[in-house]
């Protein structure tokens, strides 16, 4: 396994960006005795206080997958919610349209097939994972840990700095009917992409301030015909719980996840 830091110029954002990649050990094909190509890829998204280094620094994700044929791509959206902002910074396009091409140019053994590309994240990254999966249809599986999956019935004054939120999403009274709403994206999915919906996974802790938002979002997604695995347990909006639940996320993906040896 290798941990790679790729520094590239984003034509879409007009700035140099960093992205981290965990690249698996070459796996030998017993029939041909050559390294396998078409490696499955998980895009792993950070929360509001993080960047491309956060998962590596906080989660031990490199240890979890050291025996698994899976590449993990960790980009940064800064504080832009994986969205094309109203001030012209197109973070959604940079991650969805540009980054996969950049990654594949550096690492051509990574799969470009939808069925082998997955996306997951925590908090803001959970929102980003579901949003990107529903808006692009480039990912066959998406997972959210403590995701900000719904802003339903949230008063604008409860959000804090309105100028910040309007810079990301525009006028908040229009949010639920915009391309930034997971519920709107779910409603429009069949008409835009057909019936091949991504499979979804969500977890949120009972003590998390986003717990009710997850309940609302999951019920809505089920009503709209999405296959979603929803798990809850005691837990706060903290790394201790997200690290524990990454095992569940990796089990959820259609890969051969080889867990580390454990005594309990």
Image (spheres, helix red, strand yellow):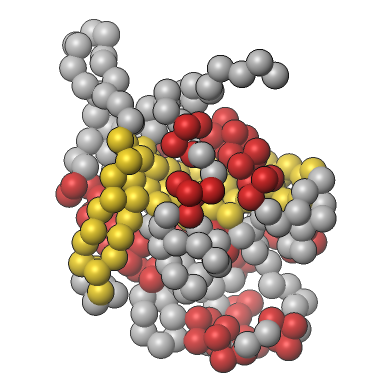
Q: Is residue 105 above or below residue 35?
A: below
Task: Name the quadrant containing residue 208.
Answer: bottom right
Task: Name the quadrant containing residue 96.
Answer: bottom left
Q: Is residue 131 above or below residue 5?
A: below
Residue at left offset 55%, top offset 66%? 49
* Front one among 187 and 174: 174
The C terminus, quarter of image: top right
Q: Position of residue 19 (x, y in %)?
A: 32, 56
Q: Position of residue 193 (x, y in %)?
A: 44, 56
Q: Is residue 251 above or below residue 249?
A: above
Q: Is residue 37 above or below residue 149?
A: above
Q: Position of residue 230 (x, y in %)?
A: 71, 44
- Could one spot residue 160 in this view of the protein? yes
Is residue 46 rendered to the left or right of residue 176? left
Q: Position of residue 86 (x, y in %)?
A: 44, 86
* Front one among 32 and 22: 22
Q: How many numbered markers are drawn?
A: 0
Task: Name the quadrant containing residue 262.
Answer: top right
Residue at left offset 21%, top offset 42%? 107
Residue at left offset 25%, top offset 74%? 15
- Could one spot residue 128 in this view of the protein? no
The N terminus, quarter of image: top left
Is residue 256 rendered to the left or right of residue 203? left
Residue at left offset 58%, top offset 55%? 122
Seen as rendered, the residue at the extreme top is 31
């Amino acid at each position: 396994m290798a941990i790679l830091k790729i520094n590239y110029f984003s034509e879409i954002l007009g700035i140099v960006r960093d992205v981290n990649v965990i690249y698996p050990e070459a796996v030998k094909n017993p029939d041909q005795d050559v390294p396998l190509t078409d490696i499955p890829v998980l895009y792993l998204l950070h929360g509001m206080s993080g960047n491309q280094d956060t998962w590596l620094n906080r989660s031990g994700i490199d240890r979890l997958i050291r025996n698994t044929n899976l590449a993990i791509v960790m980009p940064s959206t800064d504080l832009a919610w994986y969205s094309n902002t109203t001030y012209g910074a197109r973070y959604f396009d940079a991650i969805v349209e540009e980054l996969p091409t950049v990654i594949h140019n550096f690492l051509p053994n990574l799969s470009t097939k939808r069925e082998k590309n997955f996306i997951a994240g925590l908090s803001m990254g959970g929102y980003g994972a579901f949003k990107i999966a529903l808006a692009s249809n480039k990912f066959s599986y998406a997972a959210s840990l403590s995701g900000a999956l719904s802003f339903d019935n949230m008063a604008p004054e409860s959000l804090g700095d309105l100028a910040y939120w309007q810079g990301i999403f525009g006028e908040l009274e229009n949010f639920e009917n915009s391309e930034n709403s997971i519920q709107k994206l779910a409603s429009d999915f069949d008409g835009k992409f057909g019936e091949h919906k991504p499979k979804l996974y969500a977890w949120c802790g009972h003590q998390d301030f986003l717990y009710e938002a997850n309940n609302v979002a999951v019920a809505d997604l089920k009503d709209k015909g999405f296959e979603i695995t929803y798990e809850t347990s005691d837990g706060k909006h903290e790394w201790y719980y997200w690290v524990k639940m990454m095992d569940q996320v990796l089990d959820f993906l259609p890969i051969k996840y080889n867990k580390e040896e454990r005594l309990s």
